Amino acid sequence: MGIIVENNIFTLHTNNSSYQMKVDDKGSLIHTYYGKRTDETDYSYLIALADRGFSGNVPQAQDERTYSLDFMPQEFPVWGSGDYRVNCLQTDLGSGVNDCLLVFDSYKTYTGKYALQALPAMFASEHDKVETLEITLKDYHEAFYVHLLYGVFEDYDVITRAVVLENKTDQNIILSRIMSACLELNTSDWDMIHFYGRHAEERETERVPLFHGITELKSTRGTSSHQHNPFVILAEKNANEDMGECYGFSLLYSGGFHMQAEVDQTCQARLVMGIDDSDFSWELPSGACFTAPEVCMSYSALGLSKLSHNYHNAFLNHLIRSKWKDKQRPVLVNNWEATYFDFNAGKLLKIAEEASALGLDMLVLDDGWFGKRDSDYSGLGDWVVNEEKLGCSLKQLVDEVNGMGLMFGIWFEPEMISEDSDLYRAHPDWAMIVPGREPIRGRSQLVLDMTREDVQEYVKERLFAIMDSANIQYMKWDMNRSIAAAYSAKLSGKRQGEVRHRYILGLYHVLEALLQRYPDLLLEGCSGGGGRFDAGMLYYSPQIWCSDNTDAVERLRIQYGTSFAYPMSTVSAHVSVCPNHQNGRVTPFKTRGICAMQGTFGYELDLSKMTDEEKDMVRKQVQTFKQHYRLFQFGDYYRLTSPVDNHDYTAWEYANKNGEEACLSVVFTDLHGNPVPQIVKWKGLLANREYKVLRDMEPVGKYTGTALMQGGILLPIPKENYDSCQFYACVEE
Ligand code: GLA
């Protein structure tokens, strides 16, 4: 039983964690526990009531000055209730001011997992040990209801939360802030681990202590963004990969988001997470509901690796829907860094010919195949094949590529419009431009108003037409700018605060329609690389282009940060040429291969312009990846060193779930005149079994699992800058 309800106490159990809340004698839903698995003890005994002065008392408390929401741990704190900390809800229920006070109304439980209207959400089948709890709160005065949804994934140590607001008053309600989840901890001594960055430098890892006041992360860009990721960890001070308590929070949403963590006057910590509220307002008509996106929470008492495994397993089994999550991913070659806009069918076919000869599986045609698109100044929106440029029809090209034994994939940027496009000339009002003002451009392009049904229909019609015209098995869905002024000609002036969220709903609607129509399509997400690498997108795309930065060494940090929440099979990574196009660095070809094998593997260079030696290496890399794809795609991923802390080398490992096989990769990031011996310890092996160990395909010896995990393995001395090696260990039959 994942959910136990007794005496107004709700205890949610997963295999290794418990979460508890309680309706107290004032009708407030208070939070009492989240941590290591426990019993059903009523943990409210840990709440110290006191008259703290200047803390408001709710009407139900009458003269009881020791009862204030200002220090009570709550499930869903709201603005206007005498609680002055960060909150989950600001709403005007008709008085003209944001003023709300929630009390318990009812609850229900059922087996299975709730779904959310028009938003991504984790799912479960009837065979899974998953239960739902729905608790309904009501405003103390008005018929305004808040439904708190909890999904308990017992076997994954994951609890999801979402919120549905329901207006049963007879007037419109205005929402100005709605967070999806709140977590209260009765101590303040926590580090926050978060993932910041910029274009081509996504998901850098930073660990900072919480302090008295508010630590805040947000994206105001209309996308989850390169700058901050909607995933955050609270960790005990001494928590590391293998020990210590930590909590993860992942928002399943691809638009702007807001996360705040506050340490309050009584040294408690509160974390809230939800939609970006900087420019948000929502008119909720009488009788209507508003659904806030889901947060996936997880707890680990055993450090960060366990926390990541919880997320990886839960996302792979209960978030990613694509058939491709279980299928061997095609090793692809993408023509972007090979040709940029300068290509025709001849050039592409030469790359395809080599790809086929070297054992690759797919050619992906990137930007520039449509409309008038020979640079990034024009053409977006005109999704009509430029046959003149290609020199043939798309079908002819695809047929030829298929004839070589390769699949075919294609790039789109469906949410965008160039001013120099037929689409813009026909429908200027489809672009988000504030009337009477000059638009803010990004990459010289404008954003389509995805809130509009006519725009959604146009995008679908174009995508479907291209998809139907040839045998296309993969699509890279790109989005190459942040949203500045979000304006829709379809909404009245006072409702423009709805545009950003409606945009995301429009995007999800089109993605859903695409996947319903082409259920076998391998969809790869992208936003100038990893600007929209979030759990919301994983509901639609089983892999996401991780960064426009293809330098193997910088990718070590980017992929390291990404690995905390997201399964490595979702991390799209390619071998590119040197000097690297983003930073000019030169790295060995072998290292580029090893780094790209950390994720879903491919190439992004002109295969027809390689030396024979390089071609030979491609052949071997493709072979290695295919031989071990099960490990890379389904194995447990271990971060063995941190590229942020260890400047000599970065190491990571995949071990299959039964521990019988593992692959350990190392990239040396510094050289020394008189290097000290370096030893790396394996993880996830079987202590009592003997393993045959290979290094770069050559045998190095036989060791027990205990020896490899407790003693480790000696690394070779690097012979050149950014040298690397790959170990493979397998149980001897
Ligand atoms: C974005 C993507 C790249 C490439 C270009 C094409 O930057 O991240 O991989 O597709 O757009 O314009």
Image (tube, rainbow, N blue to C red):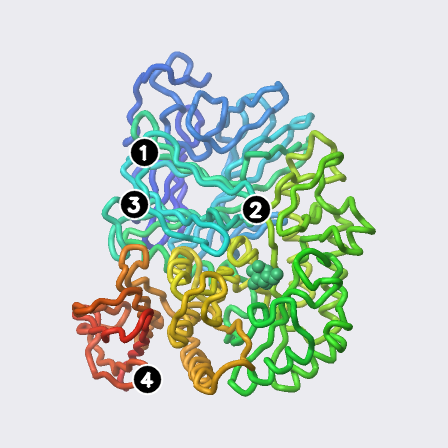
Q: Are marks 4 and 1 in contact (CB under 8 Å)?
A: no
Looking at numbered disc 3 in the image, what kind of residue is underneath it?
Answer: Asp
SS at circle 2: loop
* Mark 2 or mark 1, earlier in chain: 1
Q: Nearer the viewer, residue 162 or 569?
A: 569
Q: CA distance from mark 4 to mark 3?
A: 50 Å
* Residue linked to disc 4: 697
Q: Select label 2 or label 4 by which is in front.
A: 4
- The quadrant holding residue 700 is bottom left
Neighbourhood count class around disc 4 (C-alpha, 10 Å): few under 14, some 14–19, many 20 upward? few
Ligand 1 under 8 Å from disc 2 Cβ: no
Q: Select label 4 or label 3 by which is in front.
A: 4
Q: Are marks 2 and 1 in contact (CB under 8 Å)?
A: no
Q: CA distance from mark 3 to mark 1?
A: 31 Å
In the picture, measured across the screen, residue 493 lies left or right of residue 678, that is: right
* Mark 2 or mark 4, earlier in chain: 2
Q: Select label 2 or label 3 by which is in front.
A: 2
| Residue 727 vertical position relative to residue 322 in the rendered view, above or below | below
Looking at numbered disc 2 in the image, what kind of residue is underneath it?
Answer: Gly
SS at circle 3: loop
* Mark 3 or mark 1, earlier in chain: 3
* Residue linked to disc 1: 211
Neighbourhood count class around disc 2 (C-alpha, 10 Å): few under 14, some 14–19, many 20 upward? many
- The quadrant holding residue 35 is top left
* Residue linked to disc 2: 255
Looking at numbered disc 4 in the image, what kind of residue is underneath it?
Answer: Met
Question: Residue at position x 24%, y 54% from top?
Answer: 243
**Residue 112 visible in rendering:** no
Q: CA distance from mark 2 to mark 1?
A: 28 Å
Q: Residue 46, position in %: x, y?
A: 28, 32
Q: CA distance from mark 2 to mark 4?
A: 44 Å
